[in-house]
């Protein structure tokens, strides 16, 4: 049984194979998961992640039990997380879990009789977003994942997508990370091998291949506000790309959306492509 709980569960061979199939398939509908059932078990709000799993599963001929607001489930009656997972594993072929607590996906895997896919736990990891982020980089840098200058900006302390992406890209040679955040929101664990920390993004914009922007996670108590100007973004190298896992608040002005370097809507499209293949790998 294959659980996807951490980036550590994603070997290079697994990722390359998944990305190759995603590139070939491009999200086309099929019946590869006909008769299979996926449960979306979300203890936190989600638009893109829950919807893309729903879309991916449906486009492969499967069905989804959507529990996207647990306050209307038996959790409101006092049911434990473990019992909810055990219950849904009797009705499903896999469960996607999002939870506010670090390690919740690991707990789910210990009690589930079907594969668990971590869709974000606390401020820890978000491995399936990293599959998509990695694919975006792989796609736009000619299958290259090394020798890149990666600038990460925002709430690095609580941004689980940031932590997972650093964990992935840190495997590859000669990647350099610019970590841009205020002191109270710095990346505090799993620091990469080569990095530079600053609170001033202007120091590193012109030395950036990938600008990965994240919002401030107010739901985790973070207090800060920032927005990049169109002039700052236009100063990026012509061959760079700008990524954002969304939701966007005011970090990137909408005027930049039409710039060829803006790849955040490509990330959203790729989420269905990649999650189709991931679900097939996990459920078959």
Image (cartoon, rainbow, N blue to C red):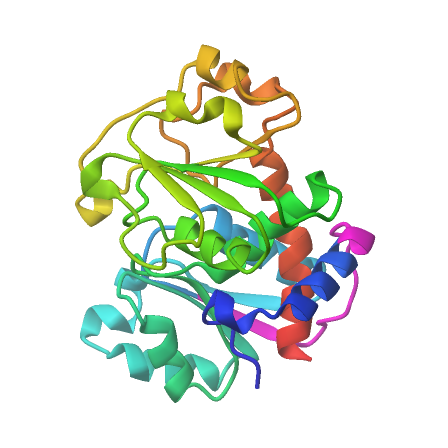
Residue found at the very far top of the displayed protein? 231
Which quadrant of the figure has residue 43? bottom left
Placement of the C terminus among the 4 image quadrants:
bottom right
Q: Is residue 73 above or below residue 224?
A: below
Along the line of sight, the residue nearer the viewer: 31 or 225 = 225
Q: Is residue 119 left or right of residue 61?
A: left
At 30% from the left and 58% from the top, the residue drawn is 189
Q: Is residue 138 above or below residue 275?
A: above
At 63% from the left and 37% from the top, the residue drawn is 266
At 71% from the left and 62% from the top, the residue drawn is 16
- Residue 167: x, y in percent? 46, 59
Dominant SS of magenta comes to loop
Along the line of sight, the residue nearer the viewer: 130 or 254 = 130
Query: In this view of the protein, can residue 62 be seen by the observer?
Result: no
In magenta segment, residue 29: yes
At 53% from the left and 73% from the top, the residue drawn is 9
Q: Is residue 74 left or right of residue 270?
A: left
Looking at the rendered structure, the number of numbered marks drawn on it comes to: 0
- Residue 137: x, y in percent? 63, 44
Query: In this view of the protein, can residue 261 be seen by the observer?
Result: yes
- Residue 228: x, y in percent? 39, 20
Placement of the N terminus among the 4 image quadrants:
bottom right
Q: Which residues are magenta?
A: 23-40
In magenta segment, residue 106: no
- Residue 139: x, y in percent? 71, 44
Along the line of sight, the residue nearer the viewer: 36 or 221 = 221
């Amino acid at each position: 049984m294959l659980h996807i709980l951490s980036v550590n569960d994603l070997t290079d061979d697994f990722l390359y194979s998944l990305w190759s199939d995603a590139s070939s398939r491009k999200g086309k509908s099929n019946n590869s998961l006909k008769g299979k059932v996926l449960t979306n078990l979300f203890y936190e709000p989600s638009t893109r992640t829950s919807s893309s799993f729903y879309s991916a599963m449906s486009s492969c001929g499967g069905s989804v039990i959507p529990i996207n607001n647990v306050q209307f489930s038996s959790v409101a009656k006092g049911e434990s997380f473990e019992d909810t997972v055990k219950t849904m594993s009797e009705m499903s072929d896999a469960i996607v879990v999002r939870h506010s607590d670090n390690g919740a996906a690991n707990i789910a895997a210990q009690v589930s009789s079907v594969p668990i896919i971590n869709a974000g736990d606390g401020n820890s990891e978000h491995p399936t977003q990293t599959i998509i982020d990695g694919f975006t980089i792989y796609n736009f840098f000619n299958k290259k994942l090394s020798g890149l200058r990666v600038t990460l900006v925002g709430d690095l302390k609580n941004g689980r997508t940031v932590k997972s992406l650093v964990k992935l890209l840190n495997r590859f040679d000669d990647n350099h990370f610019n970590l841009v955040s205020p002191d109270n929101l710095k990346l505090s664990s799993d620091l990469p091998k080569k990095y530079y920390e600053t609170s001033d993004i202007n120091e590193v914009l012109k030395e950036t291949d990938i600008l990965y922007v994240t919002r401030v996670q107010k739901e985790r108590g973070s207090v800060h506000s920032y927005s990049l100007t169109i002039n700052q973004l236009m100063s990026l190298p012509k061959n760079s790309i700008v990524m954002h896992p969304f939701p966007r608040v005011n970090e990137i002005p909408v005027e930049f959306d039409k710039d060829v370097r803006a790849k955040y809507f490509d990330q959203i499209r790729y989420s269905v492509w990649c999650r189709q293949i991931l679900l097939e790998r996990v459920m078959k």
